[in-house]
Image (cartoon, rainbow, N blue to C red):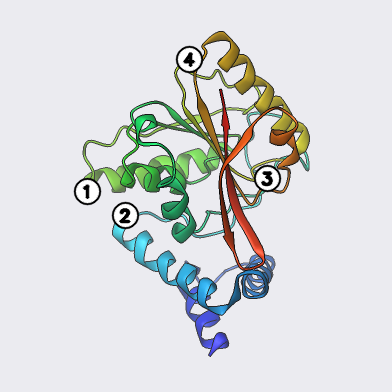
Amino acid sequence: MKVIFFIKIINSIRQDSTFEAMKVFQYIYYFLRSLFYRGFVNTFRMLTHEGKYEKQLGINTHRIVNLNNLTLAGKDSDQNHHYQGASYYILFSIFNHIPIETKVLPFIDYGCGKGRALFVAEQCGFTNLIGIDIALELIKDANENKLVYKKQNPGSLIHFAFSDAIVYEIPADTAVFYFFNPFGAAILQKVVDNIKISVSLYPRKVYCIYLNPKYKEVFERNDFKVFYTKKNKRYLEGIIYRLE
């Protein structure tokens, strides 16, 4: 039974017959990892959401993309992680825990890739959405997705920017920052520093959504407080931090 579900998801994300072997191994790894940490039921829920929402939103955000040979706005290093869309199932769940008053204020996705998280955020009621990514090709993919998405959502105001996260200028009233483990601890610390400077210059309450929180200590040693935690069996899916 598990093998059948695995074959279905691989077939759903494969776009052509030249699917690279390395990426197949990446998908196998993430599938088996999910089974171990989340269990069969949660993994199945996540897989069924993939095809459903790619089709419903009219976007193509499935494939894992490594940064090798891409055009980067900043320095290439192992601090910059590959692109992978976060689970639709988790995104819908965690976005609905952000206070409603933030939904009209700027929401920044650091390492937006092909834009999945922002399309979901808009479906959850957020209306001022900014995605930044270090890879030019991923920003192009995000804008192509936006063209298709806007046919069904003509009022969409999502904006994608090709930029290094470290130097991106944060709008003064930004209320939500989203991270799906886009980079290592050193870059994350610099971005957190930028957020703290912004809050000190323009006092306000802000929320940071951190999925796959591998470097959560960066937030916790910088006075961010845990606002909400999302867990599935053995796996910590994400944390919402608050700073004020």
Find residue 200 and name its label. Answer: none
Looking at the image, residue 218 sits to the left or right of residue 87; the answer is right
Residue 97 is drawn in which quadrant?
top left
Query: Residues under labels 2 and 4: Cα distance?
Result: 30 Å
Q: Which residue is mark 2?
A: 57
Q: Which mark, by number, is residue 69? A: 3
Residue named by callout 4: 172
- Dot 3 amino acid type: Asn
Closer to the eye: label 1 or 4: 4
Residue under the point 66% across and 69% down: 37
Q: Of the residues tagged 3 and 2, which is closer to the observer?
A: 2
Question: Between marks 3 and 4, how big is the CA–CA gap?
Answer: 34 Å
Q: CA distance from mark 1 to mark 4?
A: 31 Å
Residue tagged 1: 152
Whether pointer 1 and pointer 2 mark residues with C-beta atoms closer than 8 Å, the reply is yes
Tell me the SS state at disc 4: loop
Please state the horizontal and vertical placement of residue 220, each as a whole percent of the image: 71, 35
From the top left corner, tell me how far across and down residue 100 is, in percent: 35, 36
Which quarter of the figure has residue 57? bottom left
In the picture, measured across the screen, residue 79 lies left or right of residue 129, that is right
